[in-house]
Amino acid sequence: MKYVKQFLRYFEQFPAFTTRDVKLFLRKNGASKGYYRVFMHNLVRSGRAFGIKKGAYTLYDDPMMGGFTFSPFYYGLETALTYHKLWDYVTPVTIVTTRRITGSKIELLGRNTTVRRIQRKLFFGYSMVGYGGGFYIPMADIEKTLIDSVYFHTRFSRDVYLKMAKRIDAAKLNSYLKQYSGIVKKQVNGYLQDYEE
């Protein structure tokens, strides 16, 4: 199939891409206007590309690449707990985004995924961390994971909260809490007091 080698070489450097990206690439390389449909259909059917959601693709059979189609976003809650080694469970991918979403439970490349919407003013508390293949992904830090568990009404086991309490940076947590309502602050501080040893 024409253009495949150039296409794979170019798009392997991106965790995800859109139909628009495909159209631009193919047009730049001389393809006809509607060719992108047949091209992507064949790539997906052959297993060299994967559909993430309508109009979004990746070359990697990895649900962690799917978050990029919800940008701006970060991986949080259960996914952050796994990353920070605060528990050992196999968990669904959890994406936190400022974008409007329909339905919070989806399947992303064959894996159960939860998508949560957050206000723009509360979109912070994450950093870019190394991930396989030379990519970097946005991951919530422990302080934001604790706050998000209260904010999104997601509860973890006592053991997890004990581990979180031991690793919390109090100054960072307090700076984050300034953006939240008194109810959230009170609940977060209550969790810390309950789980302090």
Image (cartoon, rainbow, N blue to C red):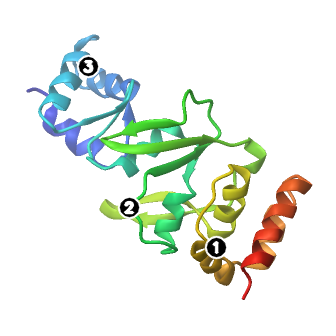
Residue 5 figure quarter: top left
Residue 38 figure quarter: top left
Mark 1: few/some/many CA within 10 Å (<14, 14-19, 20+)? some
Q: Earlier in the sequence, mark 2 or mark 3?
A: 3
Describe the element under mark 3 as helix, strand or loop. Answer: helix
Q: Nearer the viewer, mark 3 or mark 1?
A: 1
Mark 3: few/some/many CA within 10 Å (<14, 14-19, 20+)? many
Q: Nearer the viewer, residue 95 or 131?
A: 95
- Looking at the picture, how far across and down is residue 171, in whole percent? 81, 77
Describe the element under mark 2 as helix, strand or loop. Answer: loop
Q: Earlier in the sequence, mark 3 or mark 1?
A: 3
**Residue under the point 22% across and 15% down:** 35
**Residue under the point 68% across and 65% down:** 146
Extreme residue toward the left, this view: 1
Mark 3 is on which residue type? Tyr
Q: Nearer the viewer, residue 10 or 106?
A: 106
User: Is residue 87 found left or right of 28 in the rendered image?
Assistant: right
Q: Is label 2 in contact with label 1 (beta carbons under 8 Å)?
A: no
Q: Is residue 180 above or below residue 48?
A: below
User: Is residue 99 found left or right of 106 in the rendered image?
Assistant: right
- Looking at the picture, how far across and down is residue 97, in whole percent? 60, 42
Residue under label 1: 161
- Looking at the picture, how far across and down is residue 169, in whole percent? 72, 79
Mark 2 is on which residue type? Val
Q: Is residue 26 above or below residue 104?
A: above
Mark 1 is on which residue type? Tyr
Q: Nearer the viewer, mark 2 or mark 3?
A: 2
Extreme residue toward the right, this view: 182
Residue under label 3: 36
Q: CA distance from mark 2 to mark 1?
A: 18 Å
Residue 195 figure quarter: bottom right
Residue under label 2: 90
